[in-house]
Image: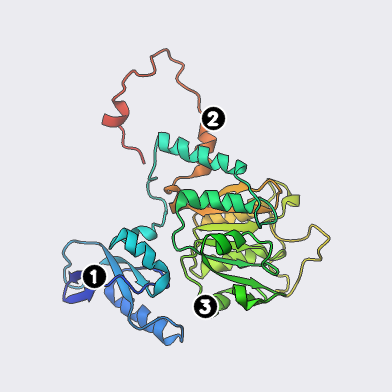
Amino acid sequence: MGAWMKRSNFYWAVPLWEIHDMTYLYFESVANFFSHRRREDSSGSSVSSEYMIWFNFRGPRYRKPNQNAAFLFFAVRPEPYRHLLGHHGRDCHHLIRPCSSGPWRHDGDALAVLDDWVNGLQHTERKVFSLNGEDGIIEAIFDRFGEGTKYFVEFGCQDGAQTSTRLLRERKGWTFLLMDGDYEDLSINLHREFVSASQICGTFSKYLVLRQIALLSVDIDLKTLDVLEQILRCGYSPRVIVVEYNAALGALTSARVPQNLPETAMWDGQSNYFGASMLAITKILREHVYSLLLADNAGVNLFFARNDQLGCADIALISFIRRKFVGPGFGLPADAGANFLGDTLKTE
């Protein structure tokens, strides 16, 4: 499988098979791509010098000399995505559809369905291996979103027996990386690693973590938010994030342990001095284009989704509007001007 694209005097072959680390890349010129590829190759990572690229051209249809053009493309390598290509053929650009301030992809009844689904997640809790009801919630989330890469990373999982992700690894056939500061069991790919904000990106590189993680589960007690922020800053983009929070701090307090605490500092296991509040974590993740789906009924974990999984809609705003909406009180029948929305308005 492959495709050819010509821009100016350049030709590229675009075979779409060898896929491993799907990285969303945006450059304003072709030259930036080649310099980036050289930097990646010289870093000593396992990234091959032959990238398999999917281009989606954005810019002037015909370039003038010295005129910048913009490309969206994927730099990718071997196995984990092969099943996706088998199903979707050559159309790979849908795998990463980042949201910014652009239009929502849903409107009207579709937003109501989305809001009802989010509210219903609270009733999907089911415990198989997890400490609380994470098994059922995670299953319900990926039933809607699709499993995608079927790849997860979890750290702070102790010996791996009672985790948020054991159901995925044992019954769903996912690939994964497990890390813990005290435990190691290579038979389940569990590695002893002390996780810290300053080292987490290097640790991910060491274990060849995919940029497009389907699920990231974070449970490190004390400096949770520091580590999570750093993962996102390093360019990793989990579709779903499960993170422990400190419910003792209350709903509307934005607080976290001081960032200047030593990275070796540990939770004492007895006090409420750990982690970050729901509001603090949500504010940070909103900056990285994530939305809060729910907190579990035990008051332990928060579940977030990358906004493109929600059609780029602001689910918090949808819920707020539905609660505050008051129908027309000026006496006209509900179907008066029924063609108004279709013929007149262009929604954003």
**Residue 165 shows in this picture:** no
| Residue at image coords 62%, 55% | 281
Nearer mark to the viewer, of 1 and 3:
1
**Figure quadrant of residue 159:** bottom right
Q: Secondary structure at mark 2?
A: helix
**Figure quadrant of residue 128:** bottom right
**Residue 15 shows in this picture:** yes
Left or right: 146 as drawn, with respect to 217: left
Q: Secondary structure at mark 1?
A: loop
The residue that disc 1 covers is 2
Q: Which residue is at the far front?
A: 171
Contact (Cβ within 8 Å) of mark 1 with mark 3: no
Label 2 vs label 1: CA separation? 51 Å
| Res. 214 mark | none
| Residue at image coords 43%, 15% | 330
Nearer mark to the viewer, of 2 and 1:
1
Q: Looking at this view, is 163 or 313 the one in front?
A: 163
What percent of the width, then of the height, locates residue 264?
Answer: 73, 75
The residue that disc 3 covers is 205
The residue that disc 2 covers is 324
Left or right: 79 as drawn, with respect to 171: left
Please state which amino acid type lies under the numbered disc 3.
Ser
Q: Residues within 10 Å of mark 2 (few under 14, many from 20)?
A: few
Please state which amino acid type lies under the numbered disc 2.
Lys
Left or right: 95 as drawn, with respect to 232: left
| First along the sequence among labels 2 and 3 | 3
What percent of the width, then of the height, locates residue 322?
Answer: 51, 32
**Figure quadrant of residue 74:** bottom left
| First along the sequence among labels 1 and 3 | 1
Q: Looking at this view, is 21 or 333 the one in front?
A: 21
